[in-house]
Image: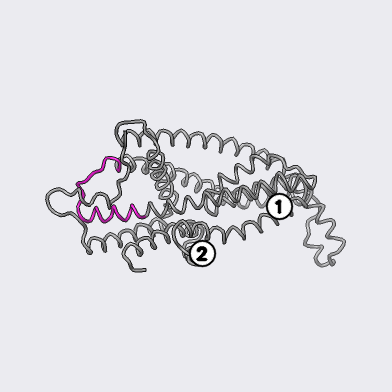
Amino acid sequence: MTISTTNSPESRESRGQGHDLRPTRIHHGVSWVMAVIALFGTLKLDLLPALLAGLLMFELTQLIARHLRVAKTRVQTRLFAVGLLVLAIVALIVLAVGGGVSAVHIIKRSVPELLLRLADIIDSLRLSLPDSALQTLPEGSNELRAIFTQWLRSHASDLGHVGLKAARYLAEIVVGVAVGAMVALYDAQGTTNLGPLGRAMEERAYRLGRAFRGVVFGQVWIAAINSFFTALYLIVALPLCGVHLPLASALIGVTFGAGLLPVIGNLISNTLILIVSFSLSSSVALASLTFLVVIHKLEYFLNARIIGSQVQARSWELLIAMLVMESAFGVPGLIAAPVYYAYLKRELTSEKLI
């Protein structure tokens, strides 16, 4: 039994009924303008999490359905794939909640120890600093704790804003996943009653999905390489130096899982590694910080190299795109840059303009 999963716009051109419904140059031009407005409007309206979640759900559904033979129709096969992905998402949420609880306990244990270590460092600095500089240094761990508490109080509204924004992003991701699943099921039906502009827009969406797929596969490789070097550091290098970091295996898992998220994933895993390192000593934390800085500076260029090979773009092209998008839209622009540039290059290449 063979189930056809090729449902791209190119394979549908011969399905028109009655008159010719193939898009003209005008239809393609209008669809390009609409695609540009939609993509940059997504950044302007802060809807990037929903877009990426929807694309990921759609592409994963197609990928799983392509390797499954569990039903007679393509719709049933994709429905089964959606069910598997929903179960996987629920399992990831449970693991994330468990990891979050563990991280909170680590932070609660680490903060007092961190303040004591900072106080020791300040005491040692008093021996070498001039008197004018000594007046600006806090006196002992109690004053440090007071400064830290005051900072938390003064930034309570900012921390609440971050929590609300995180909740909003989570809601956007849930909606994006739902939309991606519904589009995947709709796409499996092979609907043919689209006009010329609809077919042109469908082609834009198809190429955006292909570009996203290449970037995601590249990001998986990057996360795997990052996790490999992190594992070498946590379970090989540190133990050889007589240092055994708590939750090393969990940190490696978090590094891979968070590494699938461009930019923000590294911030999450790096923060956890530094907090756990500080719970042992400031020297271990300094060593971890040095390792993370070196590995992620190298990864910045490796990122462009690996993703560039997936989307047929040179490293310097992606680096420029990431620089420009980050300057224009901040961190969301940096995250979106590889996907947007890969899509742009795919469109230009398909039209034989480059």
Instruction: Please name the residue that numbered disc 1 is placed on.
Output: 288
For the C terminus, the quadrant is bottom left
Q: Amino acid at mark 1?
A: Ser
Picture residue at 23% right of the left edge, 44% below the top: 191
**Residue at mark 1 to residue at mark 2: CA–CA distance:** 28 Å
Of 247 and 8, the residue lying toward us: 8
Residue 286 horizontal side relative to residue 325, left or right: right
Picture residue at 71% right of the left edge, 44% below the top: 235
Instruction: Please name the residue that numbered disc 2 is placed on.
Output: 315
Q: Amino acid at mark 2?
A: Ser
Secondary structure mainly formed by the magenta segment: helix
Position above or below: 132 against 280: below
Where is residue 22? Give x, y as percent. Answer: 20, 56
Of 335 and 137, the residue lying toward us: 335
Where is residue 111? Give x, y as percent. Answer: 72, 45
Colouring style: one colour
